[in-house]
Image (cartoon, rainbow, N blue to C red):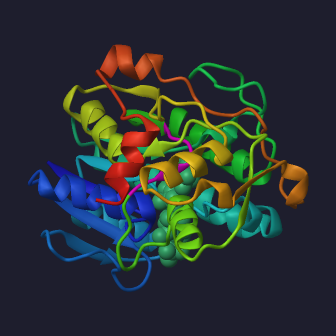
Amino acid sequence: MNILVTGANGFLGQHLVKYFSSLKHDVTAAARGESRIPKQIPFKYHSLDLTDENAVLNLVTSTNPQVIIHTAAISKPDECENNKDLCLQNNVGATRYLLHAFKLLETPGSLFIYLSTDFIFGENGPHNEDDKAGPLNFYGESKLMAEELVMGSGVNYAIVRPVFIYGPVWQGLRPSFLHWIKTNLEQNKKIKVVSDQLRTPTYVYDICKGIDYIITQNKTGVYHLAGKDILSPYQMAVTTAKVLALDAALIENVTSETFPEPVQRAKRSGLRIDKAQRELGYEPVSFEEGVKYSFN
Ligand SMILES: NC(=O)c1ccc[n+]([C@@H]2O[C@H](COP(=O)([O-])OP(=O)(O)OC[C@H]3O[C@@H](n4cnc5c(N)ncnc54)[C@H](OP(=O)(O)O)[C@@H]3O)[C@@H](O)[C@H]2O)c1
């Protein structure tokens, strides 16, 4: 199958390119600038800025994908809050250009998969797919606007919402929260981690598998592809220390007030995965297993 992955230099994008290329799909990785993706597996690389409408049209018409997996976004809430215009151009405008170009292809059986987030919701998680949206910050608002564009576009679509993605890293990928824990504890440094926020952290390989299930089972609609454990960052840090046999006593349990942030985040977030389990056969690993696999 001919699959186009946007945001292919990003954390999830690189994993998706690796995953689908290894399954012998014809993968085009689209990203800004030079490729940062390891070259062990063959894939095509297309460099572009998705805020350039003509470049997007050229990308889509020249690659003629059956599936687009659109991960590209400004994914840092602080950056979105500080530069709302830029956030809109990248998170909403780029999605509009991709949808428009994809629709022109009129490929039968095609699918547009949009990577959204739990940040489209407010408090009182974990949330179901059809819970009422209510973003608490501009990043969440921009992702919700993009979801609405996808839903109203007329293309065959699936919207996938993960939470707090973690997994293996290599050169060219930013270290994840888990790697920050490991590095500090290995150097015997004390760290403060918040315990009053709840999430359902998602092992990156589970998202790849869930998206694969959506494609192979011809599913459409909204799916929460998150982890099965509801944990605070503090609990994640302690589990990471335990799995890596590091000293959990170096981790101090603090509340969010310790780190005043310009961006409001939900205390109780996280996503329920019952629908994906029922309809796709999605079965994510436990957080403890995910940590083990992240460092193997
Ligand atoms: N990370 C999480 O915990 C999490 C949780 C829930 C949902 N998500 C969603 O999942 C998706 C992937 O997240 P991630 O963690 O992989 O993010 P990431 O590492 O920040 O990757 C996003 C990529 O998008 C690229 N990009 C942004 N604007 C672009 C543009 N105009 N043209 C071309 N490329 C552009 C960035 O390029 P540069 O590298 O050049 O900046 C970056 O490589 C995002 O849509 C995010 O909203 C993430």
Give how far across and how far down residue 110 sits, in percent.
27, 39
Give how far across and how far down residue 124 sits, in percent.
76, 24
Question: Is residue 97 visible from the viewing direction of this image?
Answer: no
Q: Is residue 132 left or right of residue 287?
A: right
Q: Quadrant of residue 36?
A: bottom left
Give the magenta range.
161-167
- As drawn, the residue found furthest toward the left would be 24
Question: Is residue 218 visible from the viewing direction of this image?
Answer: yes
Query: Please, is residue 153 above or below residue 16 in the view?
Result: above
Q: In which quarter of the image is residue 248?
A: bottom right
Q: Which residue is drawn at 39% across and 79% down?
A: 172
Q: In this view, does 239 lie to the left or right of 234?
A: left
Give how far across and how far down residue 240 sits, in percent.
50, 52
Query: Please, is residue 149 above or below residue 191 in the view?
Result: above
Query: Please, is residue 90 above or below residue 201 in the view?
Result: below
Nearest the viewer among 137 and 28 is 137
Nearest the viewer among 144 and 64 is 144
Q: Is residue 163 on the magenta stretch? A: yes
Q: Quadrant of residue 46?
A: bottom left
Give how far across and how far down residue 68 sits, in percent.
33, 50
Q: In which quarter of the image is the C terminus?
A: bottom left
Q: Residue at x 33, y 81 (%)?
A: 35
Nearest the viewer among 245 and 231 is 245
Nearest the viewer among 199 and 12 is 199
Q: Residue at x 90, y 60 (%)?
A: 260
- As drawn, the residue found furthest toward the top would be 278
What is the number of callouts on the image? 0
Q: Is residue 272 on the magenta stretch? A: no
